[in-house]
Image: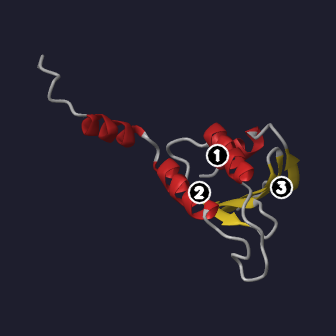
Amino acid sequence: FDDTSTISSLDLADARAAQEPVWRSRVDQRFGELIRLKDGWDGYGAGRIDPGVLNFARFVLESVMTSQTPTPSLVPTHGGGLQLEWHFGGNDIELMIYRPFEAELSVIYHDDQPPIEEQPLTSDFSELGIALHTVG
């Protein structure tokens, strides 16, 4: 087939979307919802989520997620931070991001592995990646 003139920009967009991991579009949609939160969004005077926190969360996710990794729940916090949660395979993985480069990881495994409790993370998120990909 030599005639490529019939390939439209929509076809190319569809091809890119087909290659994009499912988690990425779900996270992007949720980020859009979170950035629109107003002061007092929780009814108790919570501040807006810090856009830097969302950018940092995206950076972290891009560094640890694969196309098979389940989409995390993204929960805003009262102080403008973000909690990322994965609950699958009987394990509970939570990453609390307070500010860019200031986060804590907690993991409770369903087997005999010792839990990780509020381990500070700043720029090395390999332990999160290991927790996400050893769940089975």
Report how far apart the C-alphas of labels 3 and 2 lie in the structure.
Answer: 32 Å
Identify the amino acid type marked 2.
Answer: Phe
Label 2: element kind = helix
Q: Estimate how packed mark 1 is, as few (under 14), some (14 to 19) or many (20 or more) residues with alpha carbons within 10 Å.
A: some
Q: Nearest the camera: 123 or 135?
A: 123
* Image point (77%, 63%), residue name: 80
Q: Which mark is residue 58?
A: 1
The type of residue carrying mark 1 is Arg
Whole-angstrom CA distance, mark 3 to mark 1, is 28 Å
| Relative side of 29 to 52, left or right | left
Which residue has dot 3 on it?
A: 114
Q: Nearer the viewer, mark 3 or mark 1?
A: 1
**Residue 19 x, y percent position in the rendering:** 40, 38
Q: Quadrant of residue 44?
A: bottom right
Which residue is nearer to you in this view: 42 or 132?
Answer: 42
CA distance separating discs 2 and 1: 9 Å
Residue to which mark 2 is pinned: 31
Pointer 2 local density, CA inside 10 Å: few below 14, some 14–19, many at least 20? some
Does residue 119 appear left or right of residue 64 in this picture?
A: right
Outermost residue, front side: 39
- Of pointers 3 and 2, the one earlier in the residue sequence: 2
Q: Where, quadrant-wise, is the N terminus in this rendering?
A: top left
- Give amino acid for label 3: Pro
Assign a secondary structure to mark 3.
Answer: loop
Indicate which label's residue lies in the foreground, 3 or 2. Answer: 2
In percent of the image, x 37 and y 37: which residue is there?
A: 16
From the viewer's perspective, is 115 left or right of 93?
right
